[in-house]
Image (tube, rainbow, N blue to C red):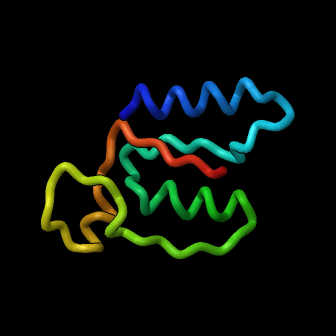
């Protein structure tokens, strides 16, 4: 997954002025509860998050567990 994400980033970066990426955020210890609000705030937008679409290795997590999960090795892209 990391390799594929890096390929997307590289292709976008290669577009120069036409690069569609607005922001890349390393999720890290704060989980998506940290990264998503910062991404939305920096973009000056509102947002709705569908936590059921967050890729997880562990099934059966409650929405608040997904939201606050310490998610190492995860990135969020705004395009």
Residue positioned 36% across, 69% down in the render = 51
Total labels: the figure holds: 0
Q: Identify which residue, 4 or 66, lies in the foreground.
A: 4
Give residue 54's position: percent from left, percent from top.
35, 59
Tell me: residue 3, above or below residue 63: above
Nearest the viewer among 3 and 62 is 3
State the quadrant of the N terminus.
top left
Q: Is residue 57 left or right of residue 30?
A: left
Q: Which percent across, then down, holds residue 7?
A: 53, 26
Q: Depth check: give the residue in front, 18 or 70.
A: 18
| Position of 69 relative to 2 (above/below) | below
> Residue, x 51% and y 48% (percent of image)?
76
Q: Quadrant of residue 4?
A: top left
Vertical comparison of 46 with 54: above or below: below
Image point (40%, 31%), residue name: 2
Look at the picture and state if 12 lies above or below 39. Answer: above
Foreground residue among 55 and 61: 55
Q: Position of residue 8 (x, y in %)?
A: 56, 33
Q: Is residue 74 left or right of residue 25?
A: left
Q: Position of residue 37 (x, y in %)?
A: 55, 64
Q: Residue at (49%, 41%) from the top-left corner?
A: 26
Q: Would residue 21 appear left or right of 72 to someone viewing this image?
A: right
């Amino acid at each position: 997954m990391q390799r594929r994400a890096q390929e997307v980033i590289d292709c976008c970066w290669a577009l120069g002025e036409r690069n569609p990426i607005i922001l890349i955020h390393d999720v890290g210890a704060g989980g998506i509860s940290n990264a998503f609000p910062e991404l939305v705030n920096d973009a000056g937008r509102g947002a709705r998050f569908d936590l059921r679409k967050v890729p997880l290795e562990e099934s059966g997590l409650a929405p608040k567990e997904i939201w606050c999960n310490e998610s190492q090795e995860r990135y969020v892209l705004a395009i």
